[in-house]
Image (tube, rainbow, N blue to C red):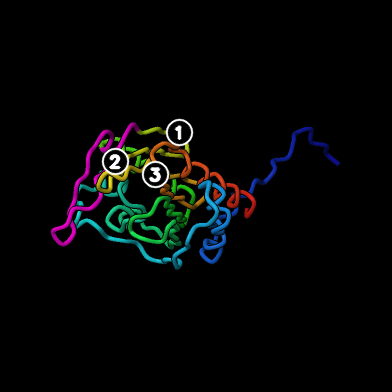
Amino acid sequence: MTLCGCAGQAMVSAPALVSDRALGGLLLDASDVADVMDTDAMNAHPLVTSMGDHRNLLPNLNCLGVWQPDEAPVYDPSHWKSVRQQMLRTPDTDHWERLAVQSVVSYRTAEGARDFLAESADRWHECRHHSISVQLNNRPLPAWRSDELTVTADRLAMPYTRDDGGQLRSCQHILQAASNVIIDVVACVPSAQPMTKADDIADHIAAKIRRSR
């Protein structure tokens, strides 16, 4: 018998990916969103399973993905698979005081999600300190002004101010890659409060992804 003093190579399996059927379960319950948003309740709208398309209002693709989450003209070139999105607000009118849009978008691989994040970082960089004023049916929509972009290894964070006829809201848009999922979250609160609520919601969703693998 020949003895070998070399160590065997351990087989390391690739991290488990998040399945499309698990996407909806990654979103926070309305009560959890309300806790993050520092309010008693948030009115949850039905789950959305398709991308939006507002390029007729804002053809600048560098800013479209910052202004609105889950935009088809921004995501489609990246070959995403599935999306789950939910809007919550209070009061439940167009003149809301607090709003959150939480969403998750799946890719076939973790690399696909990371590539989309990197491409988005380049685009979002071009939309720093940018003002947006658009009209719908000849009526102005709330004005919008972005601030400075923060980029980390797995997350983009863009704060912005929303002005609805003098009603100011402090908002934050977060884009994060976690496994094969992009977390896309927008949150807005009264202007005197910190612009970190989207960060908090994204943290909770990312924790769910870690537990699911």
What are the residue bounds of the magenta stretch?
A: 127-148
Element at label 1: loop
Query: Can residue 107 be seen?
Result: no
Return the residue at label 2: 123
Task: Report x, y in % for residue 77.
Answer: 30, 55
In depth, the one of 133 and 139 nearer the eye is: 139
- Sequence-first tag of 1 and 3: 1
Q: Is residue 71 left or right of residue 12?
A: left
Give the percent coordinates (x, y) of residue 130: 24, 37
The percent position of residue 28, horizontal first and vertical second, equals 55, 56
- Residue farthest along the right direction in this orientation: 1
Q: In this view, does 65 lie to the left or right of 8?
A: left
Q: Residue at x 32, y 56 (%)?
A: 71
Tell me the quarter of the image containing the N terminus. top right
| Marks 2, 3: nearer the viewer | 3
> Please, what is the three-letter code of the amino acid marked with disc 3?
His
Residue that label 3 marks: 173
Decide: few, some or many residues near mark 3? Use Cα within 10 Å; few <14, some 14-19, many ≥20. Answer: many
Q: Residue at x 13, y 59 (%)?
A: 138
